[in-house]
Image (spheres, rainbow, N blue to C red):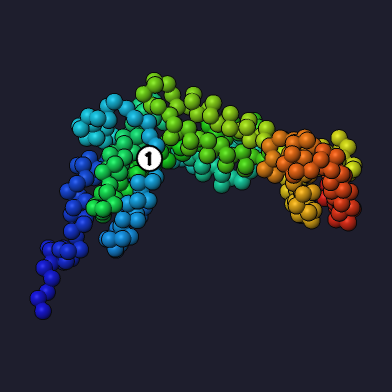
Amino acid sequence: MASATVTSTGSPESGNTTTQKIRAREPAWVRCDELAEANQEIESLVRNYDGLSNEELKTAIKRRLREELGFISNPQFSDPQLGKEIFDTPLELAPRKAELGIAAVRRSGIDMPIHLGRLCEAPLLKPEQERMLFQRMNYLLQQAEVHRSQLNPQRPSRVRLELIDRFIALAEWHRDRIVEANLRLVFSIVKKFVNPNNNFDDLLSDGIVALIRAVEKFDFDRGFRFSTYATQVIRRNSYRTVVVKQQERQKTVGGLQDLDLDLTDEGRESAISEKRWHELRSRLSVMLDDLDRREKLIIRARFSLGAHRKVHTLQSLANRLGVSKERVRQLERRAMEKLRAMAGRANLAELEPQ
């Protein structure tokens, strides 16, 4: 049997066919020195489609076609020479510094694990570096979209799919550089919203999500710094988080008052442990499940619990259930009596602060 033709590297030519096709279709700038570090880091994220059958490849293409690529377009992106131009100029990002993270933790004034400082070790970006990162990120996503628009499930292309994956992974690498350089901004904003009902960890997580969303929506060509835009997005998001939690607490407190539980102002102030409130809400949920279908609906609708975003009137519930308004009132009274009895048996007092 004739042996397979072997290249100078010792690998069968057939095994290199897809790679050779990908390299032939890639723009020259994709493998430039400026992107060497990024390409090395993302290599494991770029899927190899060689092992897929034709049907599996068609499924992968259909999935990719359903996934819209969001990016901020720019008239410059139509220039065929732009890729070479923007990746010829070095970014010259400064290395991460542990002392920057430690300083961020100390300035926060929050008692938190020192390891969180690692999130803030990236130096701030210079204006030109910031602009270049946003330009590169959006240009890479635009290139991915160009190739995505040419996908055809009836003529599946492994080469094009892998190229799209590489463009997206490179875009995310640039996005991550912007995010990590602005994490200290998130720290400085969310710490102002910390209170007994809103802990730093939750606000920080929400703030980072808001920061990523801001990066994806920022138009670098408007002429102002990203931090100006991101500050408003993160602050608005933190405020919304605090308000929503406060509304949830008010609903819970209102429900407890209707169960004739003694919640003085002093008790409310001290019963602010996040863990205890979750336990309390969990027990109330179990109690509601012990009601019949109509009683459960009435209680949740009357006290704006669960999926109900507003308090329903007796008449609106009567119309929905096909009974009289007075009958709804009777069912509500019966349900409340059941809940009071269950509250006594459940010994909710043990959830009071020690």
- Which quarter of the picture shows residue 272? top right
Visible in this render: residue 24? yes
Residue 150 image position (x, y, % from top left): 26, 43
Between 24 and 6, the one nearer to me in the picture: 24
Q: Is residue 74 above or below residue 341?
A: above
Q: Residue furthest bottom?
A: 1
Residue 76 image position (x, y, % from top left): 27, 27
Q: Secondary structure at mark 1?
A: loop
Q: Residue at x 67, y 40 (%)?
A: 199
- Which quarter of the picture shows residue 95? top left
The kind of residue on which mark 1 rests is: Leu
Q: Residue at x 49, y 25 (%)?
A: 229
Q: Residue at x 81, y 40 (%)?
A: 324
> Image check: 74 left or right of 202?
left
> Image check: 118 left or right of 165?
right
Residue 42 image position (x, y, % from top left): 35, 50
Between 203 and 309, the one nearer to me in the picture: 309
Count of numbered circles in the view: 1
Q: Which residue is mark 1?
A: 69
Q: Residue furthest top?
A: 223
Between 314 and 156, the one nearer to me in the picture: 314
Residue 102 image position (x, y, % from top left): 55, 40
